[in-house]
Amino acid sequence: MKRFIALFVLLSICLSVSPIFADEGMWTFDNPPLKQWKERYNFEPTKEWLDRVRLASVKFPGASGVFVSPNGLIATNHHVASGFIERLSSKERDLLKNGFYAKTQAEELKVPDGNVSILESYDNVTERVHAASSGASDADAATKRTAEIAAIEKDCPAALRCEVVSLYSGGEYWLYRFKRYTDVRLVMAPEEQAAFFGGDLDNFVYPRHDLDFTFVRVYENDKPASTPNYLKWSATGAPEGEFIIASGYPGSTARLLTVSQLSYQRDVGNPLQDKVWRTRRKALEDYSKRNAEAARQANPGMRSFANSLKRLEGQQTGLLNPRNFAKKEAEEKDLRDKLAAKPELNKQYAPAWDAISKAYAGLPAKANQLAFSSLASSRLATIAQQIVTYHIEVPKPNGTRYPEYRDARLDAFRSALLSPAPIYPEMEEAALTAWLVEARSVLGADDPFIKAALGDAEPAEVVGRAVRETKLIDPAARKALLEGGAAAVASSTDPMITLARRVEPVIRALREWNEKNILDVETANGTRIAQARFAVYGKSMPPDANGHLRLVYGTVKGYEEDTTLVPYKTTYFGLYDRNLSFDDKSPFDLPQRFKERRDKVDLATPLNFVYTADTIGGNSGSPVINRRGEVVGLNFDSNNQKLSNRYWFIEDSEGSRAVGVHSAGILEALRKIYDAHELAAELVGK
């Protein structure tokens, strides 16, 4: 009987292999799933509809947003804009804790180094990139490909920022042209406790009751930017069963990886990432216990790491599930079997899997060095390292530099490096000291990075002096080193610069090893596997997410969990009930204004809702749009059932859901809780 069940399960998996499932995929704008929309939802958008959505979709650092008025107004999540809000906060004016609202444009607060962008246009440059590296070895191909990409990016209109984007593991290359906005001002933000009600306990849980929204505005020439391609705000939102689309910038998926790559993630990569993030989170937690101001400074970082760790745990649980992993093995087998039936294709593409597997066999031995040979836990140390590396890279020909130092990206690099955003020296010292203590424990005292960073000294001694004596807290000092040339950096006695100089050769050698032995092999052979997929399946599936603009879709829909039903929406009734059920205790406490305004709020107003779209981290702040192109909500989370969707699409039947803030709930808060009538009127066009 057991043998029969095992055979039945294997047969079911094999039979279920298919390039695409219902509502699956993070689709590029050059290849939207028009066929699926027409067949499943009778939806046929015009080119103008798609162009408007694209030009209204705003890219934040690592996340998404949307233009919602013709005057530069952007809606996004509070947690997406929290970095902006933090830069405007201080011990005396804690905007994360207390919220903010500018009644007039004159009161809107300019964010230090605030920047967002939109995808202005795009072109397919695959033939040009592939032709440049055709016939070369993997290493030579990488050099030629990099030079060609740099040349394409450099030939860019002055007003735009250009980036060549790899899709399908190198199967395609597209030139994306971005319009950047560098004057971003805070318009309105609720209190963090309202935006993140329930805290980490409710994170990735549904039902949810979070007002996770914020509004900013972009300016040009000191005036609100003209943004005619905006999306109208729906006052009523989406009812259950409505077809919706979300447009945003999902971070990364790994659905096209080979089984050997996934095995590495499961056995080495994810556990190591967990260790790195836990180390950095604990350093901030320990620092936060010093006093209230330390807690304020550390809070954004602690929250970010807690979120990342919880997501990683869900992803790893999925990889450890034998049923899920067997599905990936079956998908790979299906593709390779179809190739085997075509000898010429098989000869051309089949070796790619073995090449990647061989490369990954050598990665575990280097994994700890690659993960812990870093100064990334400190912003000051990162600034120092960037300045040192800048003067090594920029004198090189543009096509041979690290991508982040190519001409097309230098303006953005300099802007970020010279940002006046606050730096907290005591937190810097605590974070970097704890990091180097752990790095020495993991790597050993004789490791090249540890010897370069510490010599025979203790981490506290090296870091304490570097943080206390560095001048890099002052943007003017950074600018002097940036503009002073390599000689200024070489002669600098700033202890943070000298630390960066000592570790730079070690970090560079590790980066070169990783590029030669892993990344170049992945790119060359990932391209071959992508071409094999095209030959077998056509372009019937979307590429993995990579932080660039995508379309996802589905329906507003509740789900079954265990023996009960979960509703598609929550309401203000639920928010106040959860608050009262926990006696107003953290993390279920509410800001004072919520208690004072409870009698004014229509408690039946929807607050959060769930839908079946295929989202992931980076989609935070994405507009959820109905057929009319109206914003019915803002994506801000997913439920636990969805966490492993980095590696595969989790079907609707398993209760996988994205979570959004309801457009009607946001309007209710603006009007009844925050008295933000001017903002509400701008949203609805009245």
Image (spheres, helix red, strand yellow):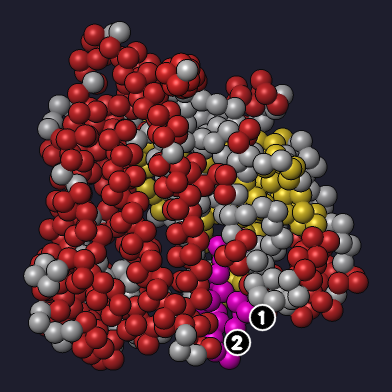
Residue to which mark 1 is pinned: 98
Residue 672 location (% of width, % of height): 85, 69
Pick the residue in front: 467 or 324.
Answer: 324
**Visible residue check, residue 686:** no
Residue 561 vs residue 434: left or right? right
Looking at the image, is 517 positioned above or below residue 542?
below
Q: Nearer the viewer, mark 1 or mark 2?
A: 1
Residue 34 location (% of width, % of height): 60, 26
Real-space CA distance between mark 1 and mark 2, rounded to the nearest whole angstrom: 8 Å
Looking at the image, is 357 positioned above or below residue 196?
above
Residue 322 vs residue 153: left or right? right
Residue 242 vs residue 83: left or right? right
Packing grade of label 1 (10 A; few <14, some 14-19, many >=20) is: few
Residue drawn at (34%, 44%) of the image: 266
Amino acid type at image mark 2: Arg
Residue drawn at (37%, 76%) of the image: 283
Packing grade of label 2 (10 A; few <14, some 14-19, many >=20) is: few
Amino acid type at image mark 1: Asn
Q: Which mark is residue 319?
A: none
Taking the magenta stretch, the answer to whether it contains residue 32 is no
Residue to which mark 2 is pinned: 93
| Quarter of image, res 52 | top right
Pick the residue in front: 132 or 651.
Answer: 651
Residues rendered magenta in the picture: 77-101
Residue 650 vs residue 362: left or right? right
Residue drawn at (23%, 44%) of the image: 519
| Quarter of image, res 189 | bottom right
Q: Are marks 1 and 2 in contact (CB under 8 Å)?
A: yes
> Does dot 2 land on a helix, a strand or a loop?
loop
Looking at the image, is 200 positioned above or below residue 129?
below
